[in-house]
Image (cartoon, helix red, strand yellow):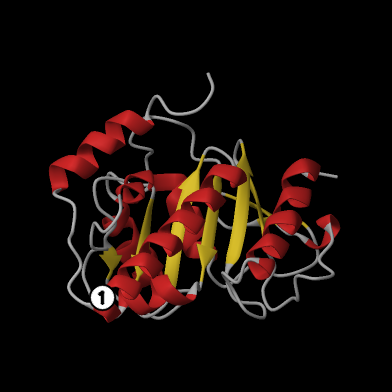
Amino acid sequence: MILAEERAAVCEFVRRMTADGLVVGTSGNVSARRGDLVAVTPTGVGYAGLRPEDVPVVRLDGEVVDGSLKPTSELPMHLTVYREAADPDGKAVSAVVHTHSVHATAVSTLVDEVPPIHYMLAAIGPTARVASYATYGTEELAKAMLEALAGRRGCLLANHGTITFGDSLGSAYSRAQQLEWVCRVWLTARAAGTPNLLPPAEIEHVVEKLRGYGQP
């Protein structure tokens, strides 16, 4: 089976998204790339029983090369990331995670950038922008997303959700979790009063520190 490992990983992570409350129903989607091929969630299919063979495989131009199910309606966003987005540290862009997480979506209706309430915002970049609203599944949305992703590994999508990428599904998913958590912290603090925010220089400093974080 073409991209067997990637298709299995797609199934694993869409179920994790549901279990972690980052999506409901069949919303949200994930993909994993190897070479010029991408394994991506099918559209309108429940995740609980999703099997690797149910996961479509497409080329970077969107042509389906394996699988009988239609790819996600958000395929333009995924393929735009793979074709045009760049990791700030030059790492491979091998996975994309798109969520409809509650707190991040709420924040996307309130601000143009995620307020720097916590240093883990640096997991995304020096800031996390909010892409302008456009109808789901359109090239207009993919274009707005790409503008917001410049120099970043993720962004919010206005009145919609989030998108993150990484050199693996694990790293892309972790960024989606961190982005949702930072948004939740800000909303919680804002409900109680006026939060103290970190200066931009501190977020930039942590961006540099995170480059050496973890095991070699």
Residue 82 location (% of width, % of height): 48, 47
> Which corner quadrant of the image does residue 2 belong to?
top right
Q: Against 20, is 102 above or below?
A: below
Q: Against 145, is 204 above or below?
A: above
Residue 63 location (% of width, % of height): 63, 57
Q: Residue furthest front?
A: 192
Q: Image quadrant for the N terminus? A: top right
Q: Which residue occupies the foreground of this view, 8 or 126? A: 126
Number of numbered tags placed on the structure image: 1
Q: Is residue 167 left or right of residue 186?
A: right
Q: Which residue does the image show at 60% across and 65% down from the upper left? A: 29
Residue 158 location (% of width, % of height): 33, 75
Q: Which residue does the image show at 54% across and 43% down from the upper left? A: 171
Q: Which residue occupies the foreground of this view, 39 or 174? A: 174
Element on which disc 1 rests: helix
Q: Against 192, is 76 above or below?
A: above
Residue 71 location (% of width, % of height): 66, 66
Q: Is residue 130 left or right of residue 136?
A: left
Q: Which residue does the image show at 68% across and 56% down from the upper left? A: 13
Q: Is residue 11 left or right of residue 89?
A: right
Q: Which residue is mark 1?
A: 190
Q: Is residue 5 visible?
A: yes
The kind of residue tagged 1 is: Arg
Q: Is residue 158 visible?
A: no
Mark 1 neighbour class, 10 Å CA radius: few under 14, some 14 to 19, many 20 or more: few
Q: Which residue does the image show at 29% across and 67% down from the upper left? A: 131
